[in-house]
Image: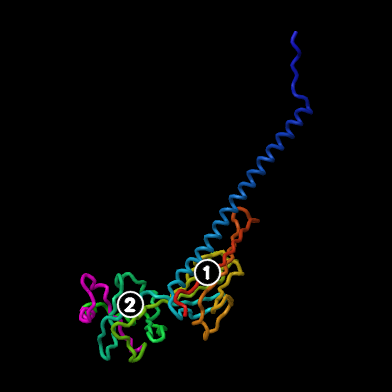
Amino acid sequence: MSAPRRGFTLIETLIALVLSSLVIILVSSTFLLQNRYQANQVLLAGVQDNARAATDLLARELRSSMRAGILVAGPRTLTVRSPVAVATVCGRSGAFFTNIDVHIDGGVSRMATEEIAGVAVLDESTGAWDYERATWSFVDGGSGGSAARCAGNGADTLNASGAFHSIRRLIFLFGLDIPDVGELVMLFRETTFRIDDSDLEPGVLALFREAYGRDPVEFASGIDTTASFRYRLGGTTYQDTVDAGSVDDIDAVRLVLDARMRSQSLPDAEVTFGLSTNLPLVNAP
């Protein structure tokens, strides 16, 4: 006769339940750890993107700035001048020749005229720019007759008449010292970068970009309180603030940026990312 069948004993059942619970706990812990790791990686990518976006924006502006282009150099505020267009004078008109004609690559339609803060004239003897503030509407002289006047001075205007434009009312900016044919002029913008309280994420700082005469725009948020601008005046030492009499001597700007972001799904998770970038001024003295 066959042996009688029997089920699991109570002890065997308890052992099986304990082992199953251990396996479930291990699998759940691994899943939660993996989920936290993925969330932290997403946070890290976010703060890295914020820091690099802020750095790239500032670098583009500084690399295009001209000599003596920095106006304000503070730990949380940096104002810099950079060209919208640089052109050679090819014609003059008006009483006392107070209007000039210039060739602008691509024409005025390709310029951000709403950001123009003024006109600068290059002093060839010193290599320094003489900056004067003026809106585009004040100095815009239109394109009528510019190509013909420039052609009369030997400029090649074939198929490019739309690239010639007149700049007027310079007597109000430079007196009678109006640039002559062959001299350089610049239409420039003034941009202020400011580290201040974020409008989009209360409780953290943000980088704002403000074009002259326009409202500031929050560009990168999640910036920590340790963020600052620093400045080098030759040598290797950087300082927090440069007075107005020495800003022309700045030859490099350092952006010290710690970005910080807190997880929305994991309240206790927070990621920081530190970035320090040196930005030499190409046109520094």
Rendered image quadrant of residue 233: bottom right
Q: Is residue 199 above or below residue 67?
A: above
Q: Is residue 223 above or below residue 89?
A: above
Q: CA distance from mark 1 to mark 2?
A: 32 Å
Report the magenta residues as a range: 148-172
Please name the residue that numbered disc 1 is placed on: 207
* 117 part of magenta stretch: no
Please name the residue that numbered disc 2 is placed on: 87
Can residue 213 be seen from the camera position used here? no
Residue 181 lies, in percent from the top left, at: 28, 84
Nearest to viewer (mark 1 / mark 2): 2
* 151 part of magenta stretch: yes
Mark 2 burial class by Cα count in 10 Å: few <14, some 14-19, many 20+: some
Residue 19 lies, in percent from the top left, at: 73, 34
Residue 247 lies, in percent from the top left, at: 51, 82
Most extreme residue toward the right is 11
Residue 66 placement, left or right of 270: left
Q: Amino acid at mark 2?
A: Ala
Rendered image quadrant of residue 165: bottom left
Please name whichever residue, 56 or 234, is drawn nearer the observer in this view of the structure. 234
Which mark, residue 128?
none
Please name whichever residue, 15 or 88, is drawn nearer the observer in this view of the structure. 88
**At numbered mark 1, what does the secondary structure look like: helix, strand or loop?**
strand
